[in-house]
Image: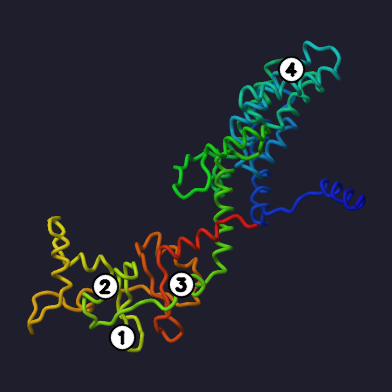
Amino acid sequence: MRFATLWTYLRAWLPGPSNVNARERLRAVGGAVLGLFVTAVLCRWLAGSLGGAVWLIAPLGASAVLVFAVPASPLAQPWSVIGGNTLSAVVGIASANWIPDPALAAAVAVGGAIGLMFFARCLHPPGGAAALLAVLTHTTQFSSALFPFFTNSLLLVLAGVAYNTLTGRRYPHVQVARPPSPDARFSQADVDAVLARYNQVLDISRDDLESLIQQTELESYKRRLGTLHCADIMSRTPISVEFGTPLQEAWTLMHQHRIKALPVTDRTRRVVGIVTQADFFRQLDLQHHDGIAGRLRDLIRATRTVMSNKPEVVGQIMTRQVRVASADRPVVELVPLFSEGGHHHIPIIDSEKRLTGMITQSDFVRALYRAVRPEN
């Protein structure tokens, strides 16, 4: 037991697995090389013009890691880089001027920089290094905050904007407000409430966190639903009619069994169409609401004469273009049919293309509910 506890503690010191592929790693490396090279060359040229001795600050290396390796991080955004490094440098210069003891000045500089960055909403880890650097080098000229600290940071950010944009990364990583989804299992207010209770700085924006949670739920839903096939959720032995079934018989079947659609099959049970309540009502003049029930009775009543001026059998009103699915088809593939295609009933066929079942929206919603239900 003690060994297990010790091993758990030691594992906390080890790095976690990385989900970043080699291409993204090379992209980050290339960005850091190019970004720092351009910044260094320009600042060295400016230092020669201004007569300055220091033209590149060490904390800029840490800033480059954030700008090019994690450009979506709130800590890597332009204001965080520029404001964090510059304001922290001001705090460090002030500490170097006003606190004689270097040890105390260093501690106050870093603590003050963190507090100021929190207040100015530009928290940037290299900012602490910028404040400490100002103290350790005993920088007392406040103009140094403009050059090299501000100038270095600005040029690095501009290089980051150009490089990240060209390589397909959004930078600045502007947060896109997404409209609430009616199907979402949580709201933006729920995320805000949890973050307020967490009460710690996260290296990810609220909007990105919400998006990741939604995508994780969707992936889980696909995984669970992906194991289901149409045969697992379909209604078996569906009630069907044939081309020559009288309208009154078809309507009675719908009414008795409380269903809204009947597959139409031939004598070999192969699907040739589908008849729905909408097909019946399509034969009526719905612009006039009065007497609809009477007109429906007249439609389905069989004509006793040889000639008729109205439909008499299912085949005359059915929808011939009908979408079917095989019994072994994954249920997840039906999502577009129900959500975007406007389908409410999908006949299921076996390997010989004979009718073997029916999936309705109710069957599909029931399967969705089981898929997204938390696992025990």
Q: Which mark is residue 93?
A: 4
For the residues labelled 1 and 4, the Cα–Cα distance comes to 89 Å
Q: Determine which quarter of the picture holds residue 148.
A: top right
For the residues labelled 2 and 3, the Cα–Cα distance comes to 23 Å
Q: Earlier in the sequence, mark 4 or mark 2?
A: 4
For the residues labelled 4 and 2, the Cα–Cα distance comes to 89 Å
Type of amino acid at the residue the image marks with label 1: Asp
The residue singled out by tag 3 in the image is: 234
Q: Determine which quarter of the picture holds residue 307.
A: bottom left
Q: Earlier in the sequence, mark 4 or mark 3?
A: 4
Residue 198 position in % (x across, y down)? 67, 35
Q: Earlier in the sequence, mark 2 or mark 3?
A: 3
Circles 4, 3 touching at the beta carbon (< 8 Å): no
Residue at 73% x, 30% y is: 57
The residue singled out by tag 2 in the image is: 252
For the residues labelled 4 and 3, the Cα–Cα distance comes to 73 Å
Instruction: Report the colour scheme.
Output: rainbow
The residue singled out by tag 1 in the image is: 266
Q: Is residue 65 above or below residue 291?
A: above
Residue extending farthest right: 2
Residue 333 position in % (x across, y down)? 47, 67
For the residues labelled 1 and 3, the Cα–Cα distance comes to 21 Å
For the residues labelled 1 and 2, the Cα–Cα distance comes to 20 Å
Q: Secondary structure at mark 3?
A: loop
**Mark 4 closeness class: few <14, some 14–19, many ≥20 residues within 10 Å:** many
Q: Is residue 103 above or below residue 36?
A: above
Q: Earlier in the sequence, mark 1 or mark 2?
A: 2
Residue 263 position in % (x across, y down)? 33, 76
**Mark 1 closeness class: few <14, some 14–19, many ≥20 residues within 10 Å:** some
**Mark 2 closeness class: few <14, some 14–19, many ≥20 residues within 10 Å:** few
